[in-house]
C-alpha cells in the first residue's frame, strides 16, 4: 500500500490562505477517499471520488472545501480561506473498485498546520 | 448513517499479556470490518479484517471476532510485545454503493509495558 502518494507531507498556511492537498492513488485504482484526522481523534470520512465524479461528499464541510479527481493527474483536496480549526492530518485512501469488501490503502497523509 | 463506538479509549498491559478492544456498530447493512494500527505520525495500516460471512479470523497473534446479531466485533492480541504499542482503530463499511468508505471508531491507545 506504499503506492498511495500524498504531497506535501507537511503544509503550513496562514489563516485566510488556500491549501491544496494532492493524492495519487495506487496505480490502477480509480476510487479515492479523503479522511480528516483531528489531533488525538479518529479518522472522519470527507469525500469519495471516482475519476471525474464525486460519488459521496456527505462528510465535506459545506463551505471552503472542495475535491476533485480529474481524468489525468492526482486527486486534489482544496481548502479555501483556512482557519485554525482546519489544522489536522488529511489522509487519502484508494481502492480498485467499489465492490463489497475491498480493502482501502492509505497514503502517508498531509499534516496541515494553520498559523 | 453508520456509527461505530470503540472501547476502551486507553489500554495498558504488561508484555506477554493479552489485549482486547471492542467495537459496536449501528448499521446492520455493514459487512466489512477492518482494524487499523496507527503509530505516532504515521498512516493507518490494516492489520486484519473480517467480512460479515465469517465469525472469527486469526493471523498469528491477532484475532478478530464478529457477532452480527449483537452488532459488535473485537480485536484480540495475544502475547503482546512493546512494538504492539500504538493506536488501534476499528472501522465498518457497507460496501456496494459506499465503496470502501469507512466509518471509524475513536481509537484505542494501547501501551505494552516491558
Image: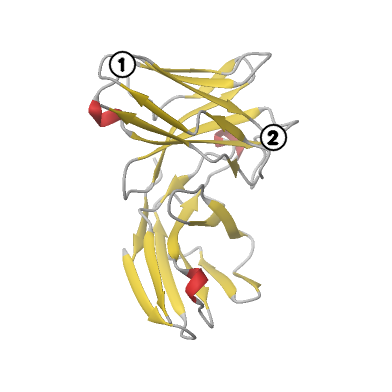
Residue drawn at 64 percent across, 60 percent down: B53
Question: Which residue is denoted by mark 2 in the rendering?
Answer: A26
Q: Which residue does the image show at 49% across and 37% down from the upper left?
A: A109
SS class, disc 1: loop
Helix, strand or loop at label 2? It is loop
Which residue corresponds to the image point at 31% horizontal and 63% vertical from the top-left?
B9
Q: Which disc number belongs to residue B102?
A: none
Residue lying furthest right in this view?
A28
Q: Nearer the viewer, residue B4 or B18?
A: B18
Left or right, B45 with respect to A21, comes to: right
Classify residue B13 as left or right of residue B93: left
Q: CA distance from mark 1 to mark 2?
A: 29 Å
Q: Is residue A92 left or right of residue A80?
A: right
Q: Which image quadrant: the C terminus of chain A?
A: top left
The location of residue B22, given as percent across then percent down, is 41, 67
Image coordinates for residue A56, horizontal then vertical, percent: 49, 26
Q: Earlier in the sequence, mark 1 or mark 2?
A: 2
Q: Is residue B91 left or right of residue A53?
A: left
**B28 or A109: nearer the eye?**
A109
Between B102 and A75, the residue placed more toward the observer is A75
What is the x, y in percent for residue A9? 49, 34
Quarter of the image where one finds residue A58: top left
**Which chain does tag 1 point to?**
A
Which chain does the numbered disc 2 sit on? A
Badge 2 density bin: few <14, some 14–19, many ≥20, Cα 10 Å: many
What colouring style does the render use?
A: secondary structure
Provide the residue designation for mark 1: A63
Residue for point 50% across, 63% down: B68
Whether A106 is drawn above or below A82: the answer is below
Eyeballing the image, is B111 above or below A53? Answer: below
Amino acid at each position: 500500500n506504499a503506492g498511495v502518494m500524498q504531497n506535501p507531507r507537511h503544509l503550513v498556511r496562514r489563516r485566510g490562505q488556500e491549501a491544496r492537498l494532492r493524492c495519487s492513488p495506487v496505480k490502477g485504482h480509480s476510487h479515492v477517499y479523503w479522511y480528516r484526522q483531528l489531533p488525538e481523534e479518529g479518522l472522519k470520512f470527507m469525500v469519495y471520488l471516482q475519476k471525474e465524479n464525486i460519488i459521496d461528499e456527505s462528510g465535506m464541510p459545506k463551505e471552503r472545501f472542495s475535491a476533485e479527481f480529474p481524468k489525468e493527474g492526482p486527486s486534489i483536496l482544496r481548502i479555501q480561506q483556512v482557519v485554525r480549526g482546519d489544522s489536522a492530518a488529511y489522509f487519502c485512501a484508494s481502492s480498485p473498485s467499489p465492490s463489497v469488501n475491498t480493502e482501502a490503502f492509505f497514503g502517508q497523509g498531509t499534516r496541515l498546520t494553520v498559523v | 448513517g453508520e456509527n461505530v463506538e470503540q472501547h476502551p479509549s486507553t489500554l495498558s498491559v504488561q508484555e506477554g499479556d493479552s489485549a482486547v478492544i471492542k467495537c459496536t456498530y449501528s448499521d446492520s447493512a455493514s459487512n466489512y470490518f477492518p482494524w487499523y494500527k496507527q503509530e505516532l505520525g504515521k498512516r493507518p495500516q490494516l492489520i486484519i479484517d473480517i467480512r460479515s460471512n465469517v465469525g472469527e479470523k486469526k493471523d498469528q497473534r491477532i484475532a478478530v471476532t464478529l457477532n452480527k446479531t449483537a452488532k459488535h466485533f473485537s480485536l484480540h492480541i495475544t502475547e503482546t510485545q512493546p512494538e504492539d504499542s500504538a493506536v488501534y482503530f476499528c472501522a465498518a463499511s457497507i460496501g456496494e454503493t459506499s465503496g470502501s468508505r469507512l466509518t471509524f471508531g475513536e481509537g484505542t491507545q494501547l501501551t505494552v509495558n516491558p
